Image: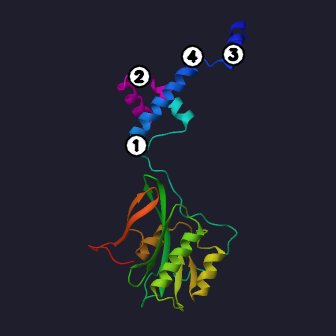
Amino acid sequence: MAPSTYYAAKRRVLEPSARALRDAVMMQVLMVLWVTNRKVYGAHKLWKAARRAGHDIGRDQVARLMGEMGIEGISRLRKRIFTTVSDPDAVRAPDLVNRQFRAARPDALWVTDLTYVPTRSGMAYVCFIVDAFSRRIVGWRVAANMKTDMVLDALEMARRSRGRRRLVGLVAHADAGSQFTSVRFTERLDEIGARPSIGTVADSYDCDDAGVGVPVGLTLAMTDRRVLALTCRPAGTPTSVAC
């Protein structure tokens, strides 16, 4: 190590370098520009904005300072979200439906699933329960996570919509996600008189055949993770239907 390098390092312990001082100033500038532009600018656009504001800064420096501050822009590439995570230790109920999603009466077969909706505040997760006879959403729940509680809340809403009575003979079908194979969910089904039915992990054919995948559209207007509006719109229905 050269003596000059050693003494330069010793001086930086006592007083910050010129680069550190400039970084501290530019961090404040970049943070203001990033917040002003609704926190959506990445390194390239933030660099352009800084140049337009008269700051002599390079793109790589902007990217480095953004990393140090822990901020990033909004990407158009959608991150892959897995809503079905199986529990290898859970006991699965048999598949009582075998993709025959037809019911002769209401409350004979319910199909439930999870989906997600990207929002400005983050990812919102939705659990909904559809009656296979009427294709109506009888229960739903929106949350910021995919815990079993949201599934139980959707089930409770569906039960209350049926007058809180025991639903003897009902089959509740879901995929093999850990929320639907959990002990709490299966015990709750037993309490209301329903039988669980479990398909395979992340089986899109189940949702499509049941009329749950494409026919159900969820319109979410959210601010800071608070749901302001949710309208269930089955395909072919010009107006929203009651859930």
Q: CA distance from mark 4 to mark 1?
A: 31 Å
| Amino acid at the residue labelled 4 | Ala
Q: Which residue is mark 3?
A: 9
Indicate the secondary structure of the residue bearing disc 3.
Answer: helix
Q: Earlier in the sequence, mark 1 or mark 3?
A: 3
Q: Which contiguous range is marked in magenta?
A: 40-62
Badge number at residue 93? none
The single residue placed furthest to the front in the displayed view is 14
Residue occupying the point 45% across, 84% down: 161
* Residue denoted by label 4: 18
| Type of the residue with mark 3 | Ala
Residue beneath disc 1: 38
Q: Name the N-terminal-most of marks 1 and 2.
A: 1
Q: Quadrant of residue 233?
A: bottom left
Q: Residue at x 31, y 73 (%)?
A: 240
Q: Nearer the viewer, residue 97 or 52?
A: 52
Question: How far apart in space, not on screen, are marks 1 and 3 (Cα)?
Answer: 39 Å
Secondary element type, mark 4: helix
Q: Identify the mark nearer the N-term, 4 or 2.
A: 4
In this rendered view, identify the residue nearer to me: 115 or 203. Answer: 115
